[in-house]
Image (cartoon, grey):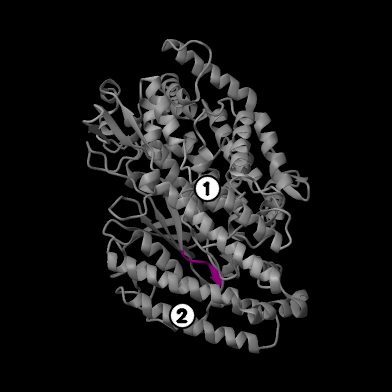
Amino acid sequence: RGRTWVGWASDARASGGSAKTPMGAPRVMRSWFSTRVGLYGLSGLHVPGDFERLARETIGKCTTLAGALKAAPARAATVKALDEISDAVCTVVDVAEVCRHTHPNREFVRAAERAYVQLQDYVAALNADAGLYEALRAARRADEADMSSECRRVALTLQEDFERGGIHLEGRTRTKFDDALSKSLEFGMEFQRNLVRPEHVNAVELDDDAHRLLPRKLQQRFQRSESTSSWRGVLDASSASTMLRSAQNSDVRRKVFVASNAGPEPNKNVLANLLSARTDVARSLGFQTYANFAMSPLLARTPEAVRAFLLDFSDSLRERAKDERALIQKYAANNHQGDGVISTWDKAYFMSQARGNECEFDSRAISEYFPLEGVIVGIGKLLERVLGLEIQMQDLASGEGWTEVLKKLVVKTRDGEMRGTIYLDLLPRPGKFNHAAHFVIRCSRKLSSTERQHPSVALVCNFAANTGTGRALLTHAEVETLLHEFGHAMHSVLSDTEYQHLSGTRAPMDIVEVPSHLFEHFAWDPDALKLLGKHYLTSEPLPNGMINALRKSKSIFDAIESQQQLVFAMTDLELHNQTSTLSPASIGDLAASIQNEHSLFPVVPGTNWELRFGHFVGYGSTYYSYLYADVLAEDIWKRFFAGDSLAPGAGESLRDKLLRHGGSRDPELLIREVLGSDALYEVGGGFRPRV
């Protein structure tokens, strides 16, 4: 779902963020359903058929509310009424969203999918309701001076969201907009479909010697071809990455790299058509480029600000990346590959060799200090120290949970004030969403002067049990992932907004990842690691030697890895910032020129990674957001946490200046309040962080 006035729909990004929707419901809404706690905490949801009833009742009540809103005089209460409608829709549609990704019972999944589609269709009708749009505009004209600052921002963003859906367009302009929007959605889906179609899935063939040298798990992914006397294996992102790090033969690595970065050929035209349709969408709405359209409500605001940031960031990486490449060359020379040139397909292998030798740690031994249960306890202690919270494990009510291994955390302040609920669905099972994500189940909002709707979220991961111990012993990377998701959860449960529309993670895309990226820093901090890492048998804390090795491994190739993310972000920006139509060939040329300019590892002939970069579809010029978040989170960490990461004052500043506001404040003002007036540079009418 895209953002509209009735919802920031969650796309469950593996980056972790899930977005939400708008509107609230005091007494009227809360009386709709039975008071007995239901599945996912939703009253009235007990069997699959309840989804149909809940969706039907929601639509009926919201239609009544919308009719009353349009008939009433325009005033500030109009904004509250719109927020109530949105909250009512989200109460069901967000549960349907998480259910269809997590419930083990296919009947529940199918029922959730039907309710999801039905409510999305209803949302589309609300977004096209000119009466609601005109009521909102009239309320802003008549009563904006008496609105609170949050109410004014909600009203502004609601109107912008309506208009980004083209509601104010007429005649041929509206027809052209609708046609372009429909095409952009279809081309986006086609691009993604081509990535998984069997005829476009890439494979590699190996001879007996090359196959024998693969790790055993990878050997099992290959099948013997009797006709060619070779081994054929289908590549996905995970297997390709593993082979590039572990295959000892450079020719094998070359084959894997080319195969995993080539095609699908049909996406050449699909991507060109997608970009063209998006340009038409933007121009119909009065924007010069799609990047201008996408960034206008964000912190960056303009492509010029993002480009300036990315170019400075690239310059800051260059010398460090050269030093890191020299280390890779050292290990290549030790492997009799000493001609001074590291092929792009050999980069991952020699980085892995260097990291293992230079950092001197055993990842399996480190995992023994991160049993899942212990890490959860450690995160609870960390949140108590840093944010003054009390995290309580609570039994699930009958019918509330969707899997036997589900855990429920209740978040309270030191004074016992209820803040929210976090469901932990962390173990893998068939049919479950296979990435890490933060799903919002219910948003925070103010119900009255004395009552608040408490938020709830689900953190979904897939931490497999260790084959030797039978327990989930997390890798350090998985600990970092869990902390990332807890950063999103804190953004949700600590939100103090009056309106649901801008609660928690419903903030601009280029700042919404800041809390999650900030929480990742705890995975590398010595004091925090002592809380998080306790041996699963002895409860001894993670030794200093292992901590030092981990910290070294983080920075050893930081510049080279950042260059790759910068290439993705710069390509995404420039493809969506063209004023004329790009041909398939010019798209390839642009992507190649950006990589050759901003990475020390040039394009490999026969590859076109841009045809496999699915994030073009979901981000559409805003992939830079992760780099913005990285830089801003690093700045916050240095200012408030470095040197004493568990100091209570630092976390409380984070809570009071950032987390509690959700998206209810202008992002520029929010960041300047957290980091100071010099935290951002103004460029071309937009804003970029310091590098």
Identify the residue at the far front of this view. Answer: 227
Quadrant in the picture for residue 244: top left
The answer to whether 681 appears left or right of 387 in the picture is right
Quadrant in the picture for residue 368: top left
Q: Secondary structure at mark 1?
A: helix
> Percent x, y for residue 611?
51, 42
Residue 317 makes an appearance in the image = yes
Which residue is found at the position 62% from the left and 50% from the top? 510
Closer-to-camera residue (320/672): 320
Q: Is residue 602 above or below residue 572?
A: above
The answer to whether 521 appears left or right of 232 in the picture is right
Which residue is found at the position 30% from the left and 50% from the top? 428
Label 1: how many residues lie within 10 Å, few (<14), some (14-19) or many (20+)?
A: some
In magenta stretch: residue 443: yes
The main secondary structure of the magenta stretch is strand
In magenta, the rendered stretch is: 441-446
In magenta stretch: residue 438: no
Q: Which residue is mark 2?
A: 58
> On the rendered image, what quadrant is the C terminus found in?
top right
3D distance between C-alphas at marks 2 and 1 = 33 Å
* Three-letter code, disc 1: His
> Percent x, y for residue 377?
37, 48
Q: Earlier in the sequence, mark 2 or mark 1?
A: 2
* Three-letter code, disc 2: Thr
Q: For the residues carrying marks 2 and 1, which lies nearer the camera in this image?
A: 1
Q: Which residue is mark 1?
A: 615
Closer-to-camera residue (131/230): 230
